[in-house]
Image (tube, coloured by chain):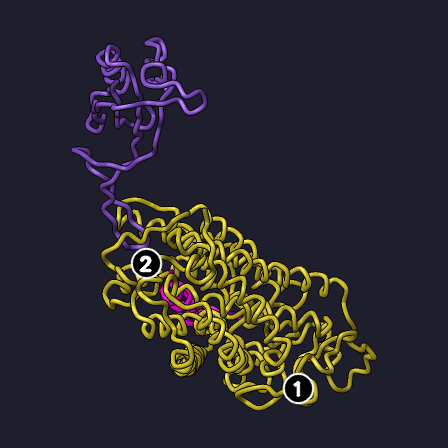
Chain colours: A yellow, B purple
């Protein structure tokens, strides 16, 4: 998701040029966006599902997968009913509206204009039907919610998760998506750069996860019992699905099958690879053995960090971003976590939150506006550029956007968790936790 | 009748089985177990969380034999399962009070 004018349409929007080119649905762009949507959905089911389930103990494997799978269904319905409208309806600076409640009036057979009705410059035309845009965005809403579950693995009641995710998606995800990705949004207005969801998805989910980890408390036996992963083979499978699916996540955020998508794909690959190698190196130096869990964690860290930057950076900076994320997230998932004592079980904060912050700030360093604004408007291009391209102010804007999303997510998540705690209780009992989520929450056994 | 119970290294199973067949042993039971003795475990590290795993995978073999055969069986297992390195395992000999073949109802000696 970005806020640019596709090159051809930039011409059509210029006053005085009598081009009769009415934007239309472009088959190539729409085909790519349909595929991107599928790739991003695959990132949650079964990407995140396997990634997380492989890391928990055997007694919680099914329960962990159930969280992602159920969230897919829950958020899909929530999104269609009101989530999409609250995110991408015009509304005000902070939230959309209910004009598209139940997708009412959705432009299913014409090219979607983001912010239609706001007037000229603010509107962002696309060449894809609104149904496709809505679906693509839905998969982002889904994965954001499912990432949070990593922080509270092994101990959250299924009913509590269900009751928490629905309002979280409506009242935390949608407003943040609106603020960053809608032309009426406050963070959009600041000029912050988040191409595919560094803040909207990863920092948002990471902070929510961290808060949840603190509110729910540590797992029974944490620091004492053996909680080693039951099946890292599953986790690796999940990580591979995430890596491949991420091309839909980042390159698809170009909303078109074009040059931007091509560069986004390239830098995504580079950052993933760099992150993998950096974490493996850090591990070898610090702990002596490069591990499978380390390799996949590094890859995901690199992918998270490149997410906000993917529409605006060249390959060289992408390499730096990946390396930085690999090393910094290694530190935050091991040393920082141990030092601060929270049980962010699967490192929702350690990898997604921290990776998102690293990526957002490095976007402010490396962004190059001309990779983006291709109509020759130098002034406009500068507003999409970062420090090294001559716009040091971007560092401040990025920092501001990170803080705003972090604070809002933290506070709103905390309040929602406390409400759900009063309603049904957030955590399973100690006995249930010892027996496992599979049998106590779902009446099933892995075998 | 005696029950010979041996805890051995997992990869030694085939060798042990091959050593017992010529002695007339017609069946045995194998269980996957974990254990420790003097052999040290491994350190496993998962994203910074370190675990000292002292229990190592082993196999437990149980074979019921006529008393006359016990010495030969124990020797055969010991020779086949030995590597000379720590963790080779142990063999125990227990008394069997009664035995019964379920299919035919044969008892004691004829059940082995």
- The residue under the point 52% across, 66% down is A143
The answer as to whether the residues below labels 1 and 2 share one chain is yes
Coordinates of residue A326 in the picture (x, y in percent): 38, 57
Q: Which mark is residue A434?
A: 2
- The residue under the point 57% across, 78% down is A181
Quarter of the image with the N terminus of chain A is: bottom right
- Judge whether residue A367 is colored magenta: yes
Q: Circle 2 — which element?
A: helix
Foreground residue among A192 and A300: A300
Q: Which residue is mark 1?
A: A121
Tell me the chief SS of the magenta region: helix
Q: Residues within 10 Å of mark 2 (few under 14, many from 20)?
A: some
- Eyeballing the image, is B15 above or below A117? above
User: Which comes sooner in the sequence, label 1 or label 2?
Assistant: 1
Q: Quadrant of residue A360?
A: bottom left
Foreground residue among B65 and B14: B65
The single residue placed furthest to the top in the displayed view is: B22
Coordinates of residue A253 in the picture (x, y in percent): 60, 68
- The residue under the point 36% across, 26% down is B29
Can residue A329 be seen in this snapshot?
yes
Q: Circle 1 — which element?
A: helix
Left or right: residue A270 compared with residue A263: left
Instruction: Report the chain holding disc 1.
Output: A
Instruction: Report the chain holding disc 2.
Output: A
Cα gap from disc 1 to disc 2, whole angstroms: 58 Å
Q: Which mark is residue A371?
A: none
Q: Which residues are magenta?
A: A346-368
Between label 1 and label 2, give the one nearer the viewer: 2
Coordinates of residue B28 in the picture (x, y in percent): 36, 22
Coordinates of residue A76 in the picture (x, y in percent): 60, 70
Foreground residue among A278 and A37: A37
């Amino acid at each position: 998701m970005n806020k640019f004018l596709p090159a051809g349409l930039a011409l059509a929007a210029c006053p005085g040029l009598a081009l009769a080119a009415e934007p239309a649905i472009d088959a190539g762009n729409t085909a790519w966006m349909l595929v991107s949507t599928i790739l991003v959905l695959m990132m949650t089911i079964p990407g995140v599902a396997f990634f997380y389930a492989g890391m928990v103990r055997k007694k919680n494997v099914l329960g962990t997968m159930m969280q992602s799978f159920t969230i897919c269904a829950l958020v899909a319905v929530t999104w269609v009913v009101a989530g999409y409208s609250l995110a991408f309806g015009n509304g005000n600076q902070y939230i959309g509206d209910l004009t598209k409640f139940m997708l009412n009036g959705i432009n299913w057979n014409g090219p979607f204009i983001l912010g239609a009705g706001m007037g000229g410059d603010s509107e962002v035309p696309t060449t894809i039907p609104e149904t496709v845009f809505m679906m693509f965005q839905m998969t982002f809403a889904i994965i954001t919610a499912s990432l949070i579950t990593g922080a509270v693995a092994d101990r959250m009641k299924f009913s509590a998760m269900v009751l928490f995710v629905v309002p979280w998606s409506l009242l935390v995800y949608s407003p943040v998506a609106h603020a960053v990705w809608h032309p009426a949004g406050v963070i959009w207005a600041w000029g912050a750069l988040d191409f595919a969801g560094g803040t909207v998805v990863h920092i948002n989910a990471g902070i929510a996860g961290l808060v949840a980890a603190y509110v729910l408390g540590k797992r029974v036996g944490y620091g004492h019992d053996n909680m080693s992963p039951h099946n890292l083979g599953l986790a690796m499978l999940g990580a591979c699905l995430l890596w491949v699916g991420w091309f839909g996540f980042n390159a698809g955020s170009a909303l078109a099958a074009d040059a931007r998508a091509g560069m986004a794909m390239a830098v995504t690959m580079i950052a993933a690879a760099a992150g993998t190698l950096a974490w493996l190196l850090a591990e070898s130096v610090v702990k002596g053995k490069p591990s499978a869990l380390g390799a996949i964690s590094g890859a995901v860290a690199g992918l998270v960090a490149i997410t906000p930057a993917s529409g605006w950076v060249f390959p060289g900076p992408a390499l730096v971003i990946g390396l930085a994320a690999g090393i910094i997230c290694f530190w935050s998932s091991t040393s920082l976590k141990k030092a601060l004592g929270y049980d962010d079980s699967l490192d929702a904060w350690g990898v997604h939150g921290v990776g998102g912050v690293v990526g957002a700030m490095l976007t402010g360093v490396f962004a190059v506006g001309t990779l983006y604004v291709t109509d020759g408007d130098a002034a406009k291009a500068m507003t999409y550029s970062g420090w090294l391209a001559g716009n040091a102010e971007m560092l401040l804007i990025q920092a501001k956007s990170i803080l705003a999303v972090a604070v809002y997510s933290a506070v709103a998540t905390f309040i929602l968790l406390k409400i759900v705690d009063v309603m049904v209780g957030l955590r399973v009992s100690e006995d249930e936790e010892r027996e496992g989520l599979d049998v106590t929450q779902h009446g099933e056994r892995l075998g | 009748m005696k029950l010979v119970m041996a805890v051995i290294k997992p990869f030694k199973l085939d060798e042990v089985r091959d050593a017992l067949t010529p002695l007339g042993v017609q069946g045995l039971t194998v269980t996957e177990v974990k254990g420790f003795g003097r052999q040290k475990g491994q350190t496993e590290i998962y994203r910074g969380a370190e675990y000292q795993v002292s229990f190592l995978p082993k196999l437990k073999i149980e074979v019921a034999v006529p008393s006359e055969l016990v010495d030969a069986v124990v020797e055969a297992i010991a020779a086949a399962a030995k590597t000379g390195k720590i963790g080779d395992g142990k063999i125990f000999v227990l008394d069997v009070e009664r035995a019964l073949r379920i299919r035919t109802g044969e008892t004691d000696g004829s059940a082995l």
